[in-house]
Structure formats: structure tokens, C-alpha cells
Image (cartoon, grey):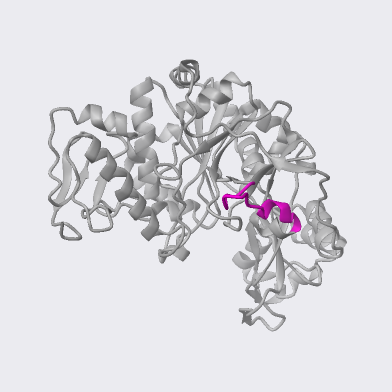
Amino acid sequence: MLTESAARKRASYYNQDHVFHFWGQLNAAEREQLLTDLEEVDFPLMQRLIDKWVLDEPPPEHFNHIEPIPVIPFDAPDAKETWEAGETTLHDGRVGIFLVAGGQGTRLGFSGPKGVYPIGPLTQKSFFQYHAEKILNLQRRYGCSLPWYIMVSRANAEATRAYFNKNDYFGLGQKNVQFIIQRMVPCVDTAAKFMLETPCHLATNPNGHGGSIPAMVENGVLDDARKRGIDLLSYFQVDNWAAKVADPRFIGYHVLRNAEMSSKNHRKNHPREAVGVHCLCDGKYHVIEYSELDIYPQLLQTDAHGDVVYYAGNPAMHIFTVDFIQRVYEHFDSFPWHRAFKKIPYIDETGVLVKPKKPNGYKFETFVFDALRFIQHPPVGLEIAREGEYTPTKQYDGDNSVVAARKSMNSLWSKWLDAAGSPVPRQANSESAITIEICPAYALNQNEFVEKSAGKTWPVNGDLAIDADGNLQYTGPATVPA
């Protein structure tokens, strides 16, 4: 561990001596905590960020020409070879799963990691369990192993590991589920000083989902993948219960086009929808964050029919080649950083915790989609339909919420039951009058469900949940009378 003398010297060199303000009041364990925090700080990087974003105000990135990216429509008639290439890649064991799961469930009204949140309306299955059941289905279908790499944060790592242990890794095997911890970066006030969360702990924030790139390399993910014969990583975020964890169609396009990084896109509902936009900027692939839309007003254009022109929204679903991640990591010093001015609680000079009512400091983070700047081969941009694939869960009610996610489940699965010959009772607005859950380990899509339902009549006179073996896990009275 960093010694006190070395830590003081380093902090003094970068004008951050104030972090030792409470040193004389700390006990041995608290002093060790502060030294640990300081040892993890990349001081040269923080100085670069401070010089660029706090002591100066750089102009926004300028592009002479911005145009929509070429997108493969979600309803495009796919050649047989696309599916075959994706399925062969899975069968050959070339695919690993990478999940970003560093958040807490606070905005969902939940105390614990967001991935543990009981999103299942009847079974109370968590996000993690839904994703695990998809992996089990794919492994059974393609006779492969899909190792699952999960990036957690310092705040939720212990609780996440305990949850997986308690649930016996959902049948995937402990050796096939690996947790890596994301780096943290200090928060900085308007005077360019590190902020303290407690007298012995720096105020920090995760380094963004772009931090998955150094995390993969520094925590041995790429080494483990190569040993297993894996050369592709399927990337998604934990709070989307519907994400296709390893989509054969997407993988097939990626492989056939020899892409290094590919992305799914969804059609934006309106110009100011809070998602980034995939664009060609001076001929190169970029994602413009929704917070930067006013810098590039052309991205808010609609056509004569009122449709968004720059419609390729970013649902944070990608495929990376292992070698590409390695190359980006080797040039990570030039990877873009982004600044956010936020309300950051801090300890003042008297040791009192201050909860500001307006923004008072800066957080710095990286975005994984900025890796598109480093590609040497054109990427795949594949459009997806939202239902059945993209239902992010950021809060309990409203847009992108728990309530909306459960509504999307009912909408999707009621169509499956209709197609399988067990028509679901409907309300006056045509929505399902019952609550439905279908285990992903049983069926990942409507075709699989219909095939497995042959000869069965499902009891749709009340709520029902179907388990991994096609048995009724739950039946009960309809939530809304038919």
C-alpha cells in the first residue's frame, strides 16, 4: 500500500494536499482507507481532466458534415447465411457475454444492486435471473459454453457476489461467471480540488461504461476469453430485462462483415428522446449524446411526415472483437472523456456533510460507444424493434420504468399465447387482462414458444407463469377481470 509519506508527496505535487485535512482525527483503519483511495487515483489523468474541463472550457467537438448512418432495418429479409453464420459462431464457442451491472436500485425504490431487483411481476425474478435463463437456453440450443463477465462497482460488488452464491449461479457454474470491479475517479469541485465524501474517503464516481474497456484487460477478461477460444464479446446493460444476450442474427452480420465493433439501434420516438444518436460525422462513426443535441441542432430534424431524420437511437447493445478491445486499451490515453456538472454531497472543512441544492462539482466518465472512433472496418448498425428487446428500467414509474417494463412483458407474451392457440382475454383497450410470465429458459422467442406449446392449451383464465420446463409455476386470479 502507498505510504503516508508517498501519498502526501503525490497529493502535494498535484495541489491536492487538502485531502489530508482530517488526518490527525483519523484512526488507523480510517487512515488506511484514505491511503487506499489515493493509491487508486490516476493523478496524471486527473490533472489532464482538470486542466481541460475545470481550469479551461474547451469548445465542443466540431464536424463539417453529419449524416445518418446506414442501418439494416429490423424487418429486412435476412439471407440464410446471416443466421447460419451467427449460429455457427455460437456453436463453435466463440462468444462470451459482457454485462454492465455497477448500479444500485435506488431510483427503483430498492435497496441493493439494480441487477437483483425483482422485475418479474409474478415470480419476482431479478434482472440477473432473466439474463441467466437466456444464457441457459442458448447453451442448450447450441451446445456451447457462454462465459458471463459481469462488471460491478465497488458499491455493489459484495452484494452481487453474495446473490449469485445464494442462487448457485443459476445453474451456470461458478467458473463460468466472473465479476470484475470498475474503476472509480475522484469528483472535483469548481476550484479544481478533489472532494471528500467522509473525512477518510474521497468522493468518487464510476468511470462510465467506457470503463469496461480497461476493466476487461486489467481484470483478465480478454486473457480468459482467449483461453476459451472466444473472439467476440456481446455487450449489454443489466436493467433491460428483454435484451438478447447473444443474438445469432446480430452475430451473423458482425462476422460476415468482418466488423470490429457493431451496434444495435432503435428508432427514436421523438427528436429529444433521452438516448444517444448514431451518426456519420465527417465520414466516421460517432454517437452524439442526448445531452449534446443542442450543439448539433440538425440532429433534431424531422421529415415531412414528422419522423425523426437522425433516428438511430443507442440502446447500449454492442458486439466487440477481443482484439479490438485490446487495441483500444493500448490507446486509451486518447479515449474521450466527458464532464457532468452535478450536485455532489461533500464534507466541508469543519467535517459537516453538505448536500448541495444546486450543482457544485464535476464528475468525469467515459462512454463505451466512443470506441467506434477507433474502428478500422465499417461496423454493423442493426435496427431493432423495442418490444421484446429494449425496455430499459431507470425508475419505478413513468417512461423507462418498472411499470413500463412489466407492461411490455404482458404485451409481448400475450402475443405468444395468442399465436400458440391460447388467446389471452383482453381489456377494452386491447391490452392483456391477465399478467403473464414466460421463463426465457423455456422460450426465447415466439417461434420457440409456439413449437413447444404444440398440443398444449394454456389456462388463460387467470394470471400465469410458465417455468423453464414448461410447467405452470404460478396460476391465480386475473389482475384485471376479463
Q: Magenta stretch?
A: 295-309
- Along the viewing direction, whichever of 18 and 368 lies nearer the viewer: 368
Q: Is residue 314 left or right of residue 481?
A: right
- Measuring from the top left, give residue 52's x and y in whole percent: 84, 58
Dividing the picture into quadrants, the one containing residue 282 is top right
Q: Residue 415 at what x, y percent from top left?
A: 28, 42
Q: Is residue 300 magenta?
A: yes
Q: Is residue 373 magenta?
A: no
- Furthest-front residue in view? 304
The residue drawn where x is 39% and y is 42% is: 388
Quarter assignment of residue 187 = bottom right
For the question of whether residue 139 can be seen, the reply is yes
291 over 446 or under it: above or below: below
Left or right: where 482 falls relative to 436: left
Quadrant where the C terminus sits is: bottom left
Question: Is 190 or 301 nearer to us in this picture?
Answer: 301
Q: How many marks?
A: 0
Horizontal and vertical percent position of residue 306: 57, 53
Residue at image point 47% right, 47% down:
238
Q: Is residue 360 above or below residue 439?
A: below
Name the magenta segment's main secondary structure.
loop
Q: Is residue 169 positioned above or below 43 on the image?
A: above
Q: Is residue 226 visible?
A: no
Q: Position of residue 466 (x, y in %)?
A: 21, 41
